[in-house]
Image: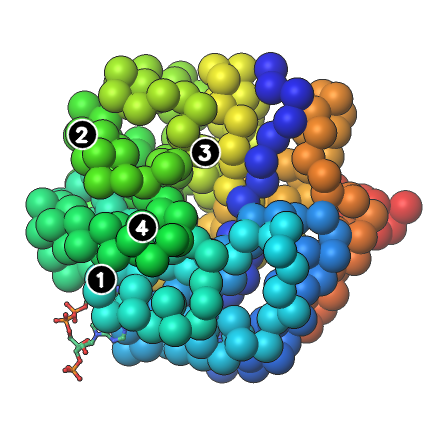
Amino acid sequence: MPKHVKIVEVGPRDGLQNEPGSMLSASVKANLVDQLAAAGLTHIEAAAFVHPKWVPQMANSAEVLSRITRHSHVCYSALTPNMQGLERAIATGIDEIAVFGAASESFSQRNTNCSIEQSLARFEPVAKTALDAGLKVRGYVSVVVDCPYEGAVKPEVVASVADQLLQMGCYEISLGDTIGTATPARMLAMLDAVQRFVPVAQLAGHCHDTYGQALVNVMALLQAGISTFDSSVAGLGGCPYAQGASGNVATEDLVYLLHGLGIHTGVQLDRLVRVGQNISDLLGRPNGAKAGIALSNG
Ligand code: HMG
Ligand code: MG
């Protein structure tokens, strides 16, 4: 087991991108990011420079970043699907960008309007330009176990996409169980294939909780040596291109698990719980963090 786990808080992006209703204002989003940083999160995915017609909730990303009180110890990141997205991101002074690919052709088409091969060809210049500009580049692989359109995904395809992202300069590859159907044995079979190409120290787990398996998948990945996990405050979110997919593992639940295992995260759980309850109240949705609810009531 690792002694320290890096948590990548994706609530302001993965969480809010799928909220029904009108887009939250830039000041509310920026305040959420600031509160997350104040609770001790040091990696926060705050925005997505995608087409506003595809994901309207992320349309005010540039304004969100302009309103955040930046801290030098916090890494602020954003999704960039192509050069246009990268240019928009660079203009905000972002620290890190993420390119996002998929391990099934149908998901790649629905999410980014191109094949897997075309997406990787698009990411090459994005990664190179970002690295030249001094930014860190992260890579995502979506649908690493099941695709909502094609069913079970072959681990070798995940491994190949992850390898290509690593080769183009991604320092870390996040493995997304986008629709949250994975169980530990299938996650580990996928990881086994990916590890042949990407060192485990450069892999992250990105577990959605649709079937209530996210935390047990995190545990399995932890035991397999993964020490970076993506999570979403209050379990916000889903994916607009994966019908019915629910949010990521809640950051509060993840932190509760990790601290219980004696693993350091740097997060102050009591402060985080307040942030999760506040954003849930503001959105008028139930808090998706079980530890968050329990500690709020306690
Ligand atoms: P496209 O329509 O194929 O793009 O979209 P295009 O290059 O053909 O251009 C068409 C128009 O889009 C042009 O405008 C471009 O300027 C504009 P027009 O000339 O028609 O007026 N355009 C842009 N505008 C703003 N920002 C841009 C941009 N690029 C082109 N970056 C594109 C291709 C990739 C842009 C589109 O498919 C898109 O935005 N997709 C994003 C989908 C998305 O955000 N999905 C959710 C995030 S992924 C996720 O949640 C999974 C993850 O959490 C991991 C997991 O859980 O598995 C990461
Ligand atoms: Mg996701």
The answer to whether mark 3 and mark 2 are in CB contact below 8 A is: no
x, y percent for residue 287: 67, 56
Residue 155 seen in the figure: no
Numbered mark located on residue 205 in the image: 3
Numbered mark located on residue 82 in the image: 1
The answer to whether mark 1 and mark 2 are in CB contact below 8 A is: no
Front-lying residue, 8 or 65: 65
Which comes before the other along the chain, label 3 or label 2?
2
Of helix, strand and loop, which one carries label 2? Answer: helix
Which comes before the other along the chain, label 1 or label 4?
1
- Looking at the rendered image, the disc whose residue lies closer to the viewer, 1 or 2, is 1
Of helix, strand and loop, which one carries label 1? Answer: loop
Could you give the CA–CA distance between mark 3 and mark 1, rounded to whole angstroms?
23 Å
Could you give the CA–CA distance between mark 1 and mark 4, rounded to whole angstroms?
14 Å
Front-lying residue, 150 or 219: 219
x, y percent for residue 104: 18, 41
Could you give the CA–CA distance between mark 1 and mark 2, rounded to whole angstroms?
20 Å
The answer to whether mark 2 and mark 4 are in CB contact below 8 A is: no
The answer to whether mark 4 and mark 3 are in CB contact below 8 A is: no
Which comes before the other along the chain, label 1 or label 2?
1
Which comes before the other along the chain, label 2 or label 4?
4
Q: Is residue 191 above or below residue 101?
A: above
Task: Kindly identify which residue carries mark 4.
Answer: 131
- Looking at the rendered image, the disc whose residue lies closer to the viewer, 1 or 4, is 4
Callout 3 amino acid: Gly
Could you give the CA–CA distance between mark 2 and mark 4, rounded to whole angstroms?
22 Å
The answer to whether mark 1 and mark 4 are in CB contact below 8 A is: no
Which comes before the other along the chain, label 4 or label 3?
4
Q: Residue at x 67, y 64 (%)?
A: 34
Front-lying residue, 267 or 55: 267
Q: Is mark 1 within 8 Å of ligand 1?
A: yes
